[in-house]
Amino acid sequence: MAYQNLLITEEDGILLVTLNREKALNALNGQTMKELKTFFGEDAAKREDIKGVILTGAGEKAFVAGADIKEFLALDAGSGQKMSKQGQDIFFLIEGFHRPVVAAVNGFALGGGCELAMACHMRIASENARFGQPEVNIGIIPGYGGTQRLIQYIGKTKATELMMTGDMIGAKDALTLGLVNYVVPVGETVSKAKDLLAKIAEKGPIAIQNIIASVNAYFQHDQDGFQKEVEVFGEITATGDFIEGATAFIEKRKPNFSGK
Ligand code: CO8
């Protein structure tokens, strides 16, 4: 497939995938999600010869600043559910990928961007990285698995606070909470991810594949939570608050929520 929004290079058996919409802080629009699906579900899925994949964002400001809010206003309950479910399924492809996938998080990893990083097997953060689930600021909830995976990584207490306040946390706090594996200076996330993948490539690939499968199996009981997230996401996309939140973002003003 010819990719428009993903820049893919290969070096020493490692596929480096750069989400390449720097002007929109690499926000995940429909096209980018489609390309992630093709990459992890088809093109890279056939590659038995690779050591792993690194996902990063173009520029130093953002890994991914979320799903593309500018595409939200066309959503309704049905299409909102569909989009959430399709996004979750794409992120399951990443989580279940046969080789390690490392997120090199340079800057903002917000909303769908934090969810994307969490779907990867490991995360390297630059010192300027900022993580958060700010969906609540526009009157919605995380819809790409965030309500489930954030709890898996940092526990219910802090996950609930972050989702309810929409607050961002810096790289050091993300490390303390167990959200990331390492914090490195700006510009060094990809090289650290390469070192990690090179080390893992010395181990048995069948073992690595089965560690991925077994670790994922530990959380299978959470499947109902994912389904719940899809249903609720769809319902919220039919509310006035959702339209108001997304509109306010686009118009660069504070939202005025009515609770309807
Ligand atoms: N979507 C679309 N465009 C975005 C997004 C986004 N998520 N984030 C940033 N941009 C755009 C801005 O609109 C701006 O574009 P323009 O220059 O055309 O106005 C450009 O990127 C640069 O952004 P800012 O000018 O806002 O840069 P700042 O440095 O002032 O602020 C922030 C950076 C703090 C990251 C700010 O851009 C921000 O708050 N972004 C939104 C973050 C957010 O709310 N993310 C969550 C989105 S919702 C989500 O991810 C839900 C996932 C589940 C979806 C389920 C299916 C529907």
Image: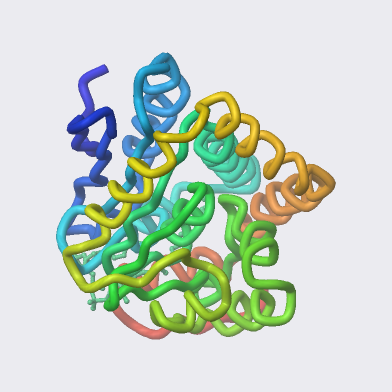
| Residue 36, image x, y percentages | 38, 34
| Residue 215, image x, y percentages | 68, 44
Rendered view: 106 above or below 218: below
Q: Quadrant of ligand 1?
A: bottom left
Rendered view: 219 above or below 170: above
Residue 10 visible to the viewer = yes
Question: Residue at horizontal 64%, vertical 58%?
Answer: 149
Rendered view: 98 above or below 256: above
Q: The C terminus is located in which quarter?
A: bottom right
Q: Does residue 55 appear left or right of residue 78 in this picture?
A: left
Residue 239 visible to the viewer = no
| Residue 115, image x, y percentages | 51, 56
Determine which quarter of the picture holds residue 3.
Answer: top left
Determine which quarter of the picture holds residue 169.
Answer: bottom left
Q: The N terminus is located in which quarter?
A: top left
Rendered view: 245 above or below 86: below
Determine which quarter of the picture holds residue 232.
Answer: bottom right
Question: Residue at horizontal 28%, vertical 51%?
Answer: 56
Residue nearest the observer in this picture, 178 or 160: 178
Q: Does residue 65 appear left or right of residue 114 in this picture?
A: left
Question: Residue at horizontal 37%, vertical 75%?
Answer: 130
Residue nearest the observer in this picture, 257 or 65: 65
Residue nearest the observer in this picture, 252 or 168: 168
* Circle count: 0
